[in-house]
Image (cartoon, rainbow, N blue to C red):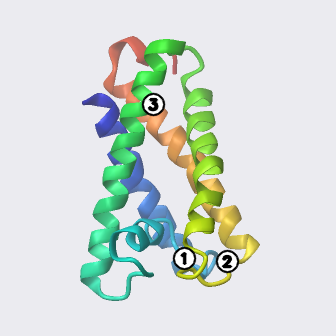
Amino acid sequence: MRGFLAGVLAGLIGIVISAFLILINWQPEVDFYDFAGIFAVGRIPVTWGERAMGFFVDLIVSGILGILFAFVLVVVGCRYLLFKGWFFATAVWYMLYPLVLMILTDKVPYLSPLTSLSNAILAGLFGLLMALIYGWLSPEAEASL
């Protein structure tokens, strides 16, 4: 439960940061949870209902990543928790992002390097936040922060 909660909370914060980046026009094409919306509805979300579905799918995926991160910590331990969170999320992003682009090339317009860079930064930030929140929620991991 702690891993799921840490993932969902980190996902919420990531969505807020992604929305802020769009507001300042730093991530112009596709925001972080639009990828989840593409999986949910089969195209870039346009209506509020489609965006809401993408939002909830992104939170569910974030929660699943939090659970996986908690399982990884059982095996590797909680020492250097922030580094492990950053590494976990960045590694997952580097494995999934090319796969998503290969599958969705006809549904996603050309993505600038700026969008890819901002998504990579957001993935690393998601990992740091997830590890930080997990450390706050877990007494055994809190000493590792």
* SS at badge 2: loop
* SS at badge 3: helix
Q: Which residue is mark 2?
A: 111
Q: What separation in Å lies between label 1 and label 2 (alpha carbons)?
A: 8 Å
Q: Quick one: label 1 or label 2, which is nearer the N terminus?
A: 1
Left or right: where does residue 78 sit relative to residue 10?
A: right
- Callout 3 environment at 10 Å: few (<14), some (14 to 19), or many (20+)? many
Residue 38 in the image: x percent, y percent? Answer: 43, 73
Residue at horizontal 54 percent and vertical 77 percent from the top: 22
The N terminus is located in which quarter?
A: top left
Residue 17 in the image: x percent, y percent? Answer: 49, 63
Q: Are marks 1 and 2 in contact (CB under 8 Å)?
A: yes
Q: Amino acid at mark 3?
A: Phe
Q: Quick one: label 3 or label 2, which is nearer the N terminus?
A: 3
Q: In terms of depth relative to the viewer, which is nearer, 38 or 88?
A: 38
Q: Which residue is mark 1?
A: 30
Residue at horizontal 50 percent and vertical 71 percent from the top: 20
Left or right: where does residue 27 sit relative to residue 77?
A: right
Q: What separation in Å lies between label 1 and label 3 (alpha carbons)?
A: 26 Å
Residue at horizontal 64 percent and vertical 76 percent from the top: 26
Q: Quick one: label 1 or label 3, which is nearer the N terminus?
A: 1
Residue at horizontal 35 percent and vertical 38 percent from the top: 6
Q: Which residue is mark 3?
A: 69
Occupied quadrant, residue 7: top left
Occupied quadrant, residue 81: top right
Tell me if residue 52 comes above or below residue 59 in the rendering: below
